[in-house]
Amino acid sequence: MIRSSLIPTKTHFFCGTISILVSLSSCSDEPTVKKSVIASEYTGPVVTWVLPENWGENPALAGPMAGSFHVKTKEGPQGRIGIMPFRESVSSLEVANMFAREIGYGLLDEERLAAFLEKKSLGDREFELIRLEEQRTTEAPKTVLLALHRKDSQTWLFPFIAQSKLIEDELENFCFFLESTVLRAGQEPVKALAPPASPPSSSAPPTPSAPEWSIPTHWAPGQASSMRLASYKVSDEEGNELDFSVTTFPGDVGGLLANVNRWLGQIGLESTDEVGLKQYVSSITIDGMAAQLVEASSTDKTFYAAILKRNNSSWFFKLTGGKNLALKEKENFSEFLDSVCFHKP
Amino acid sequence: MSTESKTKKGQSTLAKRKALFPWLVPLASLRLTLTLLSLSMVLIFIATLEQVEIGIRGAQAKYFESLFGIWHYPIQFWGGEYLNSIPIPIPGGWLLGGLLIMNLTAAYLIRFQWTMKKFGIQLIHLGIIMLLGGQLVTQAIQEESRMQINKGESSNYIERFHGVELALIDVTDPKQETVVSIPQELLEEGGSISSEDLPFRVSVKSFGSNCDFNLVGSKDKRVGVSKEVDQGVGFSANLSIKPKSEDYSSEAMNFGYLVFELTDATGSLGTWLTLSHPAGNHWWKESPKLAGLAFQPIRHKGKLWGLTLRSKREYLPYSIELLGIENEFYQGTETPFNFESDVLINMDGNEGRRALVYMNTPLRHEGKTFYQYQMNKAADYTVFQVIRNPSWLVPYISCIVVSIGLLWQFGFHLVRFLRKNSLQKA
């Protein structure tokens, strides 16, 4: 009788059961690591690689490189290997000439370049290999091995600069490395990471087709590299030093803001934005062409840099070092800029 | 059977029920009902006062989503300078709601009689129990998120209003990305987190839901929780972190932070710092030095991973495309009377469903309800508030049950009255 009078419990149990089930379903939603696979939406560049066992990665530095590596040997790290993206397509000749002067070739032309150029298929991709062996007679001759890969109107350069023997020994690893790379240009420029370290070499004078300039007589030749067309040191009696360089790269090398921010960082200043950029940049002319002069000083360091865009290339003339000496040399730097001549037709 | 004998039988049934469930008798007390209802009013009053100080979400968490809350008499009230320091415990929503459900259920089992005369009352109480139970379930499982879509674009994910996750995204494949996300709850637990989907282990060094951060000069050393950081933006921008408690107010700007170490079979890959931006991590791109916080790259075994601390995200099996937006204001004012979003839901197999979402007319799709929440016509984007509430039908069913109960009860008495009246006339 009691049970029959408790008929509502059926309804009650039904509702209760539903509530409990719903509650339980929520309780089972424990926090866990979740994996989702979605359509690609990343718009930045993708540059990855697998390093051979005996290769190491150089610490991240500022510069036009997306990656920088060395070969681990018993004598320590040797050779310089890099990944350098260009946003525009650049010719093999332009790239070869960036390095040819350093090892005594002078300016190459298409005909001479053909002798050093070889096409190689690695995986499903085509690479151009340019091998330039040092022309000067030394005990340990160097080789510049350049690998170029072209994809979607972009050019990817992989320079391998080392003693010729090391390059011979590591050729297989270099090919393995090239094949392992994943290269995808994004909508944003590839983050520049590290310029290759520069080996000591005599400063090559500008070739007839390169611009000419007049260097102040007290500026001494400095450490040159494959990236530098000219390199000078300026010092005073108190031991202060300035470094002067002339470099050129295809394209805009990340643009004005990126370059200025990199230089600001080098003298210990905070990065700026498009608005703040104006306080550092002024307009000048070099050889009758519009250029930009960038000046900035921290408490103890100063740099002056002139940027000229000409024929789809960027030219950088930069003087940097101790603040007091830089102030004294500012006029000489201006005179140097006035002397630059590109021999326009 | 006479009325007297029916009453006697009913009373005897009640007595037997009380004897069978003696422990339910105190719970079924009407006094308890009135006390709980009175305390509920006190709770609502105090939470409303507190809301001014700590915001809606703070008041909700402190008083309604807890067993009890500690209240301090407002200092600006009469005698506040003396009474403010006394902590006053206030019974919370979970406690009062739970006790009310138990009280009603106990009364339902013990006191109510299953007769046609009382059937309406039974239904009314059943409806109220369902309403309370449904609210309890809703509070426990409802999830509120937001979806922002730019005009002409589509979105396939929603983001929680509260809570963050560490997302590690493998972007190497040009066609698809693998997103591995570690929710805030696991980050709060700390320790070492691993997953078969990750090639490295994440060791949490420090996590918090809010912080102050600043760029330390290049010559100064970082101190506190970020001093160990030796990789990524935290290192390059020399970011210093000062943890602080979460702000619950409606204008809150909480910057979550996480310091963690990545390790793989070869050892440590470095210690990283990541910050979540309360308005979305795309805002980091406005700052040249912190732009990388939106995506800090890690190269590992030929793959490019990106990491970011962001609002907890849920990917949907469909995307919603914003075709157009419209907003209308009362003439001569800036008070809106209508926001309208014209959307297209893109599902698998090229299936599409077009819908218009506007005030009080949400879009319901696959268990989620999309309400028009915000809109910026100048910037051409719309924001939906997205609710997932599996028990959303319970309040409707409860109201129907209560309505039937009321109709039954009043109808029953009306019929009896009319019958009695006609008998008297006869």
Image: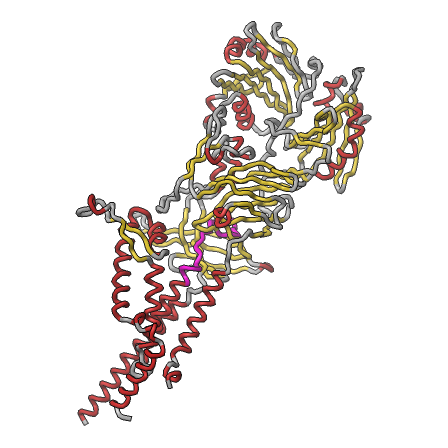
Q: Quadrant of the N terminus of chain A?
A: bottom left
Please state which of residues B163 and B22 is positioned toward the viewer in this rendering.
Answer: B22
Please state which of residues B372 and B222 is positioned toward the viewer in this rendering.
Answer: B222
Q: x and y percent of residue A63 in the render? A: 61, 26
Q: Considering only vertical position in the picture, is A182 above or below A297? A: below
Image-quadrant location for residue B416: bottom left
**Numbered-mark total:** 0
Image-quadrant location for residue B28: bottom left
Q: How is the image coloured?
A: secondary structure
Q: x and y percent of residue A117 in the render? A: 79, 29
Is B151 covered by the magenta stretch?
A: yes
The residue at 40%/57% (across/down) is: B358
* Relative horizontal placement of residue A285, taking residue B114 as reference (left or right): right
The residue at 50%/43% (across/down) is: B309
Q: Considering only vertical position in the picture, is A313 above or below B124? A: above
Q: Considering only vertical position in the picture, is A187 above or below B56? A: above
Q: Residue furthest bottom?
A: B426
Q: Taking the image as drawn, is residue B282 in sight? A: no
Q: Taking the image as drawn, is residue A98 in sight? A: yes
Please state which of residues A293 and B32 is positioned toward the viewer in this rendering.
Answer: B32
Q: x and y percent of residue A24 in the render? A: 48, 64
The segment highlighted magenta reads B137-158
* Relative horizontal placement of residue B130, taking residue A123 as reference (left or right): left
Q: Considering only vertical position in the picture, is A321 above or below B239? A: above
Q: Quadrant of the C terminus of chain A?
A: top right
* Relative horizontal placement of residue B38, taking residue B271 as reference (left or right): left
Is B414 covered by the magenta stretch?
A: no
Q: x and y percent of residue B322 in the render? A: 49, 52
Image-quadrant location for residue B418: bottom left
